Image: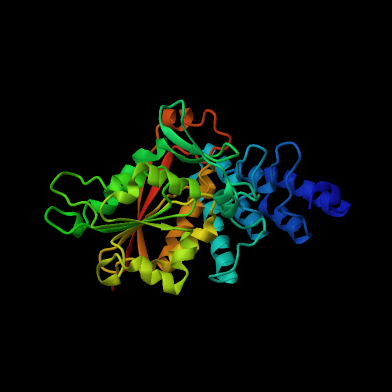
Amino acid sequence: MDEAHLPSDLLVLAHRLLAAAQVSPVSELEKLIKQGAPTWYQDDDLGWSALHYAAERREPAILETLLRGGAVWNAVDKWGRTAGEVCLSLGDQEGWEIIRNEGVRSEMLHHALAGPSSPASDSSTNLKLKAEDKTSAGDNLTFLKSQLTWDTGEDGKERVLDADGNGVMMGWEEPLMVEHVRLMTGSHPKAQPGEEGMSILNVGFGLGIVDRLFQTPQSASHPKPAHHTIIEAHPQVLEYIRLKGVHLIPGVRILEGRWQDWLLDPEKVGEVLASTPGGMGFDAIFVDTFAEGYEDLKAFFEVLPDILDAENGIFSFWNGLGATNPTIYAVSSHLAELHLEDVGLETEWHDVLIPESLREEVWKGVRRRYWELPGYRLPIAKMRLF
């Protein structure tokens, strides 16, 4: 409800709460909240909520009072900043952690109430990790029908753009993909010299960076993957795969369609697993899809126990949801860790620095940035053995 539709008595309380959040004691805020002051309200000047103003005070009790009263932890101002970013700008780690923890708590509660197969709620208190539109950047089915363009950016690296000029897959990601593959294969028993080679599943081909890296052993003495399955749905990307001859590489198998078509169908899961030793699960699974939100990623987590080798299997994913906002990114990462734990996987995080020059040059000529953070949290998850 905006200011034009807010009853006059609530509008007065809203402005009083904004003022109180800046200077008043906790007791005054509690009084206003009890009277019904809308803690979600944001002013017209900055788009700041009471939580934003309270973040400037560096008083934990003020933040906690507002959050208990229903303040929206991920409300963004006119520059896309949450109250968490206000805390970070002031070096207030304690305040930021209070807001982050509320984000994790509210999101876990949302998912617990929604159930394993329910769609995400549109409530303003829920994590915004997917564009709320039907463009190719916000909806996977729309993306699969969109026209893609391959070109070279001003950074000299190949990239794929959708019909709206949004980056789908960009060459700047390669150093991160190198780390993903290194951590997934470096110590795996089947990737050692003289061994048989791993069974790999990659969901989402993109530019083929991660698949090329999987096919490039650490040295001549290390084996290539024994089996390498790629699930890809976009018709143009499938053409790109054929153009590059990826399907002709020994041991590589291309499954055309969305991962949901293959992994949520009990009959097709058996076909997917046919390339793994004894049909028992892949040694390494990586997923990087475009225009899918956190609900889709969580649904993928839920099939992992059925397709990942229980003893030595390693899972990782492109951790890019919410990557234009540090607080939302932190909540997203923590949420993923908790949901992976729910299905029996333990996650280890590796922090990778992204140079400023790399983060700036690649976006020239791209309509939508999907990354604005200085670092990347790389997840490596394994089945928890009891």
Name which residue lies at 38% across and 49% down.
378
Tell me the quarter of the image containing the C terminus.
bottom left
Can you name the residue that lies furthest to the right here? 8
Q: Which quarter of the figure has residue 376? A: top left
Residue placed most toward the observer, 97 or 103: 103
The percent position of residue 83, horizontal first and vertical second, equals: 60, 45
Instruction: Identify whether 320 is placed above or below 201.
Output: above
Residue 90 located left or right of residue 158: right
Visible residue check, residue 215: yes
Q: Which quarter of the figure has residue 219? A: top left
Name which residue lies at 18% across and 52% down.
223
Instruction: Identify whether 152 is placed above or below 78.
Output: above
Name which residue lies at 40% across and 69% down.
269
Instruction: Identify whether 336 is placed above or below 42.
Output: below
How many dots with numbers?
A: 0
Instruction: Identify whether 159 is placed above or below 177.
Output: above
Residue placed most toward the observer, 206 or 69: 206
Name which residue lies at 29% across and 67% down.
309
Visible residue check, residue 96: no
The percent position of residue 367, horizontal first and vertical second, equals: 58, 34
The percent position of residue 114, horizontal first and vertical second, equals: 59, 69
Q: Which quarter of the figure has residue 303? A: bottom left
Residue placed most toward the observer, 223 or 62: 223
Q: How is the image coloured?
A: rainbow
